Structure formats: C-alpha cells, structure tokens
Image: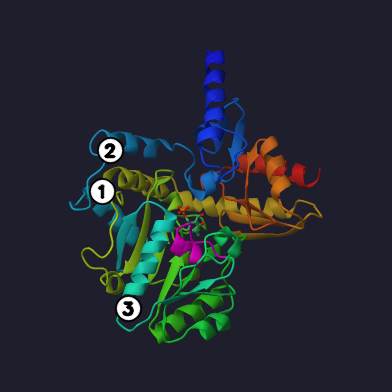
Amino acid sequence: MVKEKKKKYSEAFGAYSKYVMPTYLPEVMLVKGCGVYVWDSEGKRYLDFGAGIGVCNLGHCHPSVTEAISEQAGRLVHVSNLYMNEKQSILAKKLVEKGFEDGMVFFCNSGAEANEGAIKLARKYGSAKGKFKIITMEDSFHGRTLATLSATGRSKYRDGFAPDMPGFVSVPFNNFEAAANACDKETCAIMLEPVQGEGGIIEAGSDYLLKIRKFCDEKGILLIFDEVQCGVGRTGAFYAFQQYGVQPDVISLAKALGNGFPIGAFMAKRQFATVLKAGSHASTFGGTPLACAAAIAAIDVFEKENVLENCREQSEYLFAKLRKIPSKNIVEIRGRGLMLGIVLNANVASAKTECMKKGLLVLSAGENVIRLLPPLTVSKNDIDAAVSIIENVLNP
Ligand SMILES: Cc1ncc(COP(=O)(O)O)c(C=O)c1O
C-alpha cells in the first residue's frame, strides 16, 4: 500500500514537470489539509502560515464548508445566469449586510475577474462624460489579466506582455497630493488596496484614505477598493474598509470568499451598480449554486465561531511575539490583523525555503518581506510553533 502510494506520487511529480506550464516552481507536492496544517506527498506535516495565499481563512477543509459543498454538489452544481439561483441571492444579501451599505453584487470566479469587472463598471460610469482613466498605486497588485496587469503597480509582472492597456495612471501609494495631481477631466476612478499584499504588506494611512474619499466625492469619481487579499476578515474586520471608516463606491473580493472554493465578486453602491445594464457584463460560471453555497457556509462560520475576534486576539499575540525576536536581520514588523510582513534587510527567498524545511509555510511579498497570512482560526500554540521556527531561521 505504502509502495503504491509512493509510486502514485512519483508519477504525479513526473507528469507535473512534463505537462504543467512552468509558471510556478513548486518544491513540494501537497496532498492533504486540515485546519492550519497541510501534508506533502512524503507525509511531512507543515504549519500553513500562507493559507493558500490568503484563501483558507477558516483553515483547510473546514467541516461546515466541506459539508455545504458536498450537499450542494448532490443537488445543483451549475445553472446559467440566464436563470436565478437561490444561493446567489442569499450570498449577495449577506455580503451587503456585512457592511457594504446599499450595495449590489456581481459574481465571478477570481480576483482578477473581480477587478476587471470593477474597472469596466468605472469606465461605463465615466463613458457618458468621456472619462476612462483610473489612478492606481505603485507597488499595487490587481491580477494577471491584461487590464489588471496594466493597473498593477509593479512593472516586473508586465515584462514581455506589452503594450499595456491604456488608461491607467500609476502614482505613489499613501501620497494624497500625487493622486490628486494625477486626476484630470478624463479620470473616472481611483483604485487601491487598503492594505497592499503582494507589494510588501503596506497599509494605507487613515488620513490618506479619508482625504482620497473626500476628493473622489468632490470630483464625482469612483473610489475602488481591491480587497481581494485584505478583505473577508483578514484585517480583523470583515471588510478592511471598516477598519478605516471609509466606504468605497466599488469593492472587489475573491480569495477567502469560498474558503478555497473559487469565487469572486465585485460590489458597487446601487447608484453606480445600475450603470451596468442587461448584457453589459457576464460570466458563465460566476456565482454558481456550488460556489455560492461554499461562500455562504464560510460566512456563517465567521459568526458561529467568532472568527473576527480570534483574528484580532491572535494578531496582537503574533505581533508581540514577532517583535520580541532579537534579530539584526529584521528591519520592521508591519501589517494589520493576520496580514503581517516581517521586513528583512536581505532577500526573502532563503528564509522562506528554510522555514519550509523546518515545517512552516510562509509567503514572500516584494523582495525582502516575509508575508504571514495564517488562517484566522489559528491558535496561540500554532503561533508559538511558527514563531519559534521563524526565530531559528532568522537567528541560525
Ligand atoms: C490584491 C489582489 N488583487 C487581485 C489579485 C488577483 O487574484 P486572482 O489570483 O484570484 O486572480 C490578488 C492575488 O494575489 C491580490 O492579492
């Protein structure tokens, strides 16, 4: 049996390198997950402090989500959006009631798609007045489709895919004057992540967001928040904007929405949402009963298991523990909720690999930041174990 298992995985390794496009360079094959743990093909267990890049916010294979997926898979997996589906209505209502007042939702399948939709909505809104430009931020990340790449503020992702889609104007993040000065009569929106993820765990300043909000109101342009990574509880509030008391006009979500089941969404305030008319945007798979059932179950777990409270409590604990690590290799610990960056004075690649060897999965962000996005259900014991590995790696 054990022999057969080994053979199965060795074939999978061979097939991976032969048949899967080499856009990632994974070192291990993960075969099982439960809560904060995942296991590789050799049976080695890892603490997953990346949570599938901020996806499994309730941990791997949360039983309530698994049950909802199984139940729905036996009832109705897919219907076209030419017909209503009950699960979509329930999920849309829940998302609005979580705090996006007077909102309407469009469902899709990923973060890039959610942002594409948000960009299209902003252009449609601006089109009557010839406005199409969107002000975006340096170090931002919005996805890998051509429009979201053009909106992304890191040129390395765009290498080889020229020309960029026109209409995006990149300015330094957290610099209100730069954004205001970049705005002209063709500008229809400002788009930003309240906490930049891929760019290095960089928080927007409260004052900055308040000023941006006021400016958008004065100019009649839309404020779009990309909460694909920082939303769905990651910062300790269901929506990151709730931490700032600044409501965007449009928001994009994905990643943790289905706790691993692919689903994305963009929401807009009713007055803006209704610029999209029948036929002006569509998605074959967006918001299937199966995807929505997973997301509904995930959102319900937030309430039943006090997930946000745990996130805030463990965040404090994790920040405090990391700040006590005596290491000359650490420049700064930053972030919000359970979205943390350990800024190093060196490239992050080897620290990441060393953590993995010692049984801890972490992510990188930018060139020199260890990014931690543990499940929001993480315990103090998990944190103790993770921090001890990080300490070992940074102080060999
Ligand atoms: C802030 C942000 N927006 C958009 C995306 C793209 O999401 P997806 O990979 O689901 O297309 C990501 C992915 O990392 C992200 O972090």
Three-letter residue code for mark 2: Gln
The residue that label 1 is drawn on is 87
Image coordinates of residue 329 in percent, x first then y, are: 79, 54
The residue that label 3 is drawn on is 127
Other residues around mark 3 within 10 Å, as few (<14) / some (14–19) / many (≥20): few
Side of 123 relative to 354 (left or right): left
Side of 216 relative to 333 (left or right): left
In this picture the colour scheme is rainbow
Toward the viewer: 199 or 144? 144
**SS for callout 1:** helix
Three-letter residue code for mark 1: Lys
The residue that label 2 is drawn on is 72
Toward the viewer: 346 or 131? 131
Mark 1 residue's CB less than 8 Å from ligand 1 = no
For residue 301, say whether it is visible. yes
- CA distance separating discs 3 and 1: 33 Å
Image point (80%, 52%), residue name? 327
Is 143 contained in the magenta span? yes
